[in-house]
Amino acid sequence: TSAIGTFTATAQTSESGTSGSVTVAPGAATKLVLTGSSTQTAGQAQQLTITAQDGSGNVATSYAGDKVVTFGGAATIGAFQPTATDTTAAPVAFDSATTVTFTGGVSTAGASATLYKAEPALLTATAGSLTTSGGDRLAVMVSPAAASTTTTTVSAAPTTLTADGSSTSTI
């Protein structure tokens, strides 16, 4: 944690002295921490937060600007790939380079994730040599979405029935 303060030293002889102002600042980023909701409905987006931390777990406030992040940890189902938005809010498939903006060590633009497969997913984020690991990843339980009339198609074969009603159809 960043702090400004002074140190006071007291000798055994009771003499003491106080230092001038001392500033303790966080170090350079050494890892990423991914946070968000632990539950999500398939097909719905959730905003993720990526925090760059130094080796002591402080927010690495000097980590700033547009960074290329690769998200992983969620599965594709059919033609639906998990995505994360970039700084322009455009969806980018997981395992692809996604530009995310950081201010003061925290993501501020991009990183809204949409997952499609109902499953337990363990989301990761990597930016160059910085990555999430262990408890810094985000565990998400993706639940199935309700059937929708706009996305659900029911078809039958054959599409016509015999006059006596003896045909069978497969749905």
Image: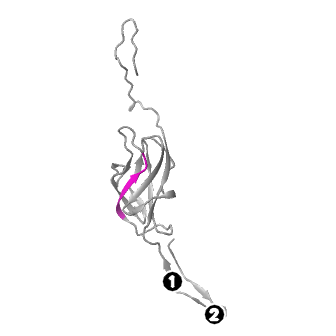
User: Relative to 141, is 85 on the left or the right?
Assistant: left
Up-down: is 90 above or below 43? below
- Residue at horizontal 39 percent and vertical 53 percent from the top: 71
| Mark 2: amino acid | Glu
Task: Give the mark, 1 or 2, whose residue is nearer the N terminus.
Answer: 2
Q: Which residue is mark 2?
A: 15
Quarter of the image with the C terminus is top left
Q: Is residue 110 visible?
A: no
CA distance for labels 1 and 2? 20 Å
Q: Quadrant of residue 168?
A: top left
- Residue at horizontal 39 percent and vertical 11 percent from the top: 167
Position in image of residue 67 (x %, y %): 35, 61
* Magenta-colored span: 65-74
Give the secondary structure at mark 2.
loop
Give whichever of 119, 34 is nearer the camera: 119
Q: Which residue is mark 1?
A: 21
Would you call the spot at circle 1 few (<14 residues within 10 Å), some (14-19), or many (20 or more)?
Answer: few
